[in-house]
């Protein structure tokens, strides 16, 4: 396929999302043919001509992400690119359930709050939200409930995330609770649900690709934001521009992107991907491969304790005469991380690391330590975080579940010492 390689230069800078949105001509040149129905091409769709080759594909504004699926774009971050204490936008993962809106207009954007447990229906323009409510900035960890799915056996269907569907940028916006208070919520409110501006893959009008939510107690936390900025910049399109929810520590599926509407519910929200097996795990542990009835599946709430080694990169070589500094992050959906331990002998012995305090609730924490190696050879460095309640990451896969959620097994990296 050498000829194809030449024609399909996937790393070309012109071949970004904008490249094939506003520059169909450019795309046509790269493809060597006109894109006949180009006007119908969804934003963010990677042309199959590129998606089906192995070369890295560039998502506009993103760097180094591994694309897992191009229909629609889903991409994760290699562990060593999550080394920053605050995740840069270019390294924050992308998870789409539907068709990404093409060109959302921040100037005309509105957010409506309604629902049977809202005292009224109110619509705010984005500018009104910014003008009428106090702004807050928090560093909040978002992790896809399916992060780590790739390891489950029997395999679960869905994006085969390894470790990179997580990140912890700084988010700026208004508190959801302030906006809900301005609208007024009734005493019987138990849940909120979101609706975004993305379309279902079938393009059925009015059919949401995903419409999830959180219990009212989570919605009313100080750190639960309606956000328009990531790290001081407008949200990247793929991460919900111009407005999204951010619920740190909970499955990121609750953090609705391209946010158009919030419904205040007097029952558990029953939108798309709230029911059946979506974002649920068996209420009681089951054997791998077991069939589980829908009524025995429970909604995932806070994410479990987890850690990630972000330095060194897995697969490297280290000189034994030098100490190896190891570092990474740890987080848990509720409470905080108490300690992170590392092992170079497959868990026979564990060494404590230095761990920072979170900058705010739901921000990940950073660990570091120095390691020495007794002899040359192949090693694995394992990291294991323990939360304030004494709950530890498991060394091997935790409870199998039909959709492959909540894999918080120890992260490990390979190392050759010479
Ligand atoms: N409107 C909308 N919101 C959404 C989604 C989506 O497909 N559409 N995906 C959800 C899921 S499953 C995850 S893991 C996060 C991913 O956020 P990110 O793409 O900014 O990383 O967004 C959530 N919010
Ligand atoms: Mo997700």
Image (cartoon, grey):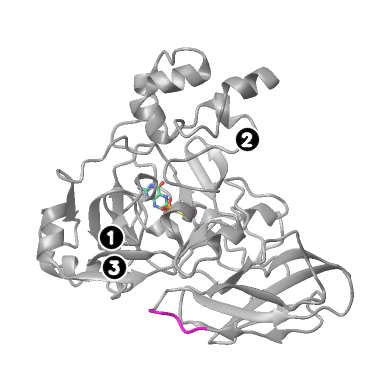
From mark 1 to mark 2, how far is it between C-alphas?
A: 34 Å
Q: Which mark is residue 227?
A: 1
Residue 114 place in picture, x, y as percent: 17, 55
In the rendering, which numbered label is found on residue 55? 2
Q: Nearer the viewer, residue 312 or 379?
A: 312
The residue sitting at 19% across, 58% down in the picture is 116
| Residue at the disc numbered 3 | 190
Which residue sits at x=47%, y=17%? 29
Q: Say which element carries label 1.
A: strand
Q: Which residues are magenta?
A: 356-360
Prevalent SS, magenta region = loop
Q: Is residue 396 left or right of residue 81?
A: right
Foreground of the two, 359 or 261: 359
Left-right relation of 311 to 47: right
Circle 1 packing at 10 Å, graded few (<14), some (14-19), many (20+), is many
Classify the position of the C terminus by image quarter: bottom right
* Numbered disc 2: secondary structure: loop
The answer to which of marks 1 and 2 sits earlier in the sequence is 2
Q: CA distance from mark 1 to mark 3?
A: 22 Å
Between disc 1 and disc 3, the foreground one is: 1
Report the front residue among 365 and 80: 80
The residue at label 2 has a CB less than 8 Å from ligand 1: no
């Amino acid at each position: 396929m050498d000829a194809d390689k030449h024609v399909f230069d996937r790393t070309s800078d012109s071949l970004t999302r904008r490249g094939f949105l506003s520059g169909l001509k450019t795309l046509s040149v790269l493809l060597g043919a006109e894109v006949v129905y180009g006007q119908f091409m969804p934003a963010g769709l990677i042309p199959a001509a590129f998606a089906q080759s192995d070369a890295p594909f560039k998502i506009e504004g993103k760097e180094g992400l591994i694309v897992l699926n191009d229909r629609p774009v889903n991409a994760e971050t290699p562990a060593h690119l999550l080394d920053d204490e605050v995740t840069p936008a270019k390294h924050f993962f992308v998870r789409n359930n539907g068709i990404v809106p093409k060109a959302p207009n921040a100037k005309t954007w509105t957010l409506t709050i309604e629902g049977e447990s809202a005292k009224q229906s109110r619509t705010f323009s984005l500018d009104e939200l910014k003008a009428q409510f106090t702004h807050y900035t928090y560093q909040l960890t978002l992790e896809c409930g399916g992060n780590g799915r790739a390891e489950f056996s029997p395999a679960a269907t869905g994006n085969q995330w390894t470790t990179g569907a997580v990140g912890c940028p700084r988010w700026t916006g208004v508190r959801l609770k302030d906006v809900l208070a301005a609208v007024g919520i009734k005493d019987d409110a138990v849940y909120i649900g979101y609706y975004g501006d993305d379309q279902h893959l079938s393009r059925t009008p009015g059919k949401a690709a995903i419409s999830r939510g959180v219990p009212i107690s989570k919605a009313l936390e100080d750190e639960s934001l309606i956000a328009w900025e990531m790290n001081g910049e407008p949200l990247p399109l793929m991460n919900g521009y111009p407005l999204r929810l951010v619920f740190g520590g909970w499955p990121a599926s609750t953090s609705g992107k391209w946010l158009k509407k919030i419904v205040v519910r007097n029952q558990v929200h029953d939108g798309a991907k709230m029911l059946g097996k979506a974002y649920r795990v068996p209420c009681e542990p089951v054997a791998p491969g077991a069939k589980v009835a829908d009524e025995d599946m429970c909604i995932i709430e806070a994410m479990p304790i987890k850690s990630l080694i972000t330095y060194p990169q897995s697969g490297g070589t280290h000189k034994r005469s030098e100490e190896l500094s190891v570092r990474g992050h740890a987080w848990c959906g509720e409470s905080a991380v108490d300690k992170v331990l590392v092992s170079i002998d497959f868990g026979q012995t564990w060494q404590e690391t230095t761990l920072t305090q979170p900058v705010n609730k739901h921000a990940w924490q950073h660990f570091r330590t120095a390691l020495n190696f007794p002899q040359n050879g192949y090693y694995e460095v394992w990291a294991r975080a323990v939360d304030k309640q004494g709950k530890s990451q498991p060394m091997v896969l935790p409870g199998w579940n039909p959709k492959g959620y909540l894999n918080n097994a120890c992260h490990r990296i390979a190392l050759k010492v010479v």
